[in-house]
Amino acid sequence: MALLEINNLNRYFGGLHAVNDVSFSVDEGMIKAIIGPNGAGKTTLFNLISGNLPPSGGTVLFKDEHIEGFQPYQIAVRGMSRTYQNIKLFHGMTALENVMLGRHVQSRAGFMAGMLNLPWTWHEERQIRQKAMEFLELFEISEFADIEVTNLSFGQQRAVEFARALATEPKLLLLDEPAAGLNIYETAEIGQLISRIRDRGITVLLVEHDMSLVMDISDEIVVLSFGEKIAEDLPAAIQQNEEVISIYLGEEED
Amino acid sequence: MDQVRRIIPVVFLIVFIVAVQLATKYTGTPFYLTQLTMSAYYSLVVVGLCVLMGYAGQISIGHAGFFAIGGYISAALTTHNLLELKDNAFVSLLNKYGVLVLREDLYGETLLTVHPWYACLLAIMTAVIIAFVIGGPVLKLKGHYLAMATLGFGIIIYQIVMATEYFGEADGISEVPSFNILPGIELGGGFEIRVVNYYIAWGLVVFGIIILQNLIHSRVGRALRSIHGSEEAANAMGIHTSRYKLYTFVLSAAFAAIAGVFLTHYNGSIGPSEAGVMKSVRYVAIVAVGGMAHLWGALIMSVILNFLSLRGVFGTYDDAVFGAILIVIMLFAPEGILGLGIFQKLKKIMSGGVSGKTPELQESKTGQKQV
């Protein structure tokens, strides 16, 4: 069953047709990757799905519900979470607090309950803290729990962002270039991590440049070029696809 | 544990409030209570603004406007004589339901005015509604644009009260009556009720600070700080950022309006200077001196600076002093005065050096820049 279904999605930036009539679907429990050269519209497509940008046309169905044009928070509460290519953590807050924010959609104390410090919220706060700690432990960064996030290394920050996204307990996780800025060892670790995330029953859709990572972990791959989908297939088939090879390596001269 | 730690400073505050009152009593200086009471009301505006600016990260240079809306509406409703309109259908209806009250003014003239209780409630509600209405569109703006929009709002309110006869134009409104807010507790500026009013004002501050402190330590408070950190990511975490910003804006406006209402009835008058831009700048300056995201810092600095200002220490340079404070703080102590090294050391010594960040971490914060 398709968890996410994208039909004829379009997005213009002025005269630029950044996403051109793209359709594909992501089945529950799979890891799907979107690849393509720079400027192919991968991140734009991501922003259309997560609600950071409204589409110019087309539909996005998540759990059989139309979510195109929704605000990001509306999409997040429906069970979609994301990370960013250039990590967006909450500065001025500790690693633990960042992950605790991931529990926002799983808790409910509002303004009144907060201001009046109602006893039931104490229990909820304890649970938020405990759960957040569990997610830090999952990424083996619980020792940095009380450190302000800008003091962490790049890799650690990425781990915090992952933990925060997972703490929302999403059905679908969008990863925007999770291996960007990491060396080959860290990239391999990220690959294992993504597989582990899938094993927890979370569907993953990722944008990635690193071909070895994509070929290793993906179940299916969508290839974008100049905003258009040019191929969608299994990794092995994509490697043999002549059109894909030509856009990545250039065309052979006759 | 966290709950207990939160109560301790509140207990300190209450003890301090009582101690100051007793000190003025035994040293024969009860006249200080007047300025301390007024400082308390201004502090109410400051702590509300502190949550909006320091925690949610949304600036407002128009909070004197909300203070003035509260003060002016309550003052106007409780001073304008409706006796001539007694036969008006609407006025007689209000009279029938006990919304109006007959009283005598200083010259023995009989006045029919809105009961102060209803006037106060209506004033605060009006401020809240206005905050809701303008907050919606205005809070879509960010940074300088938000600052300019709120500044514009403050100027509009100032111009309205300056140009409206109903609000007394440049003279403002005087002879605002004192009244019993609760049976036996009179809100007003009379000498014989000075001590009671000192406790009314500070009681409100204690109540306000407990509520705000609870809020910033709650799930919502964490969400507000995340909006400050990255609004886009906060939104993607499922936080309805525009609603959270709006509610916080309205909450801080309500604090300002309550302060305006109480101070107006305490002083017995209100003038256009309370709505002025310099008043708004002053509130912002005090929040900055206190360290932005520091409720207690804002409260402490507010009491000190407002008290000095009201005692006339700054003389005719009053507004200039607050402008200068804002510049100096932004240049040399953007973390606020209490964020300066000397106070941090003091805090460390007080807490036995266990809490707070380790020095190595402090260094790495400045030394290492992340990409």
Image: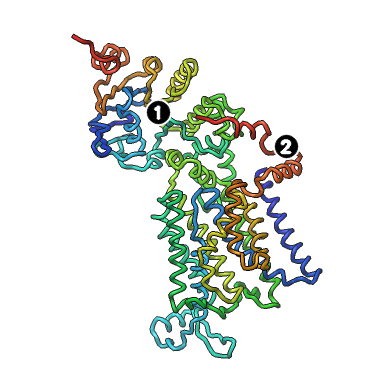
Where residue A97 sits in the image (x, y, percent)? 56, 37
Q: Which residue is mark 1?
A: A176
> Relative to B171, is B134 on the left or the right?
left
Q: Amino acid at mark 2?
A: Val
Of residues A86 and B125, which is closer to you in this image? A86
Q: Chain of mark 2?
A: B
Residue B98 in sight:
no
Disc marking residue B354? 2
Where residue B98 sits in the image (x, y, percent)? 49, 80
The colour scheme used here is: rainbow
Q: Is disc 1 surrounded by few (<14), some (14 to 19) or many (20+) residues within 10 Å? A: many
Quarter of the picture holding the C terminus of chain A: top left
Marks 1 and 2, how far apart at CA: 40 Å
Q: Amino acid at mark 1?
A: Asp
Residue lying at 38% horizontally and 42% vertically, measured from the top left: A74
> Relative to B190, is A105 on the left or the right?
left
Where residue B266 sits in the image (x, y, percent)? 61, 73
Quarter of the picture holding the N terminus of chain A: top left
Dot 2: element: loop
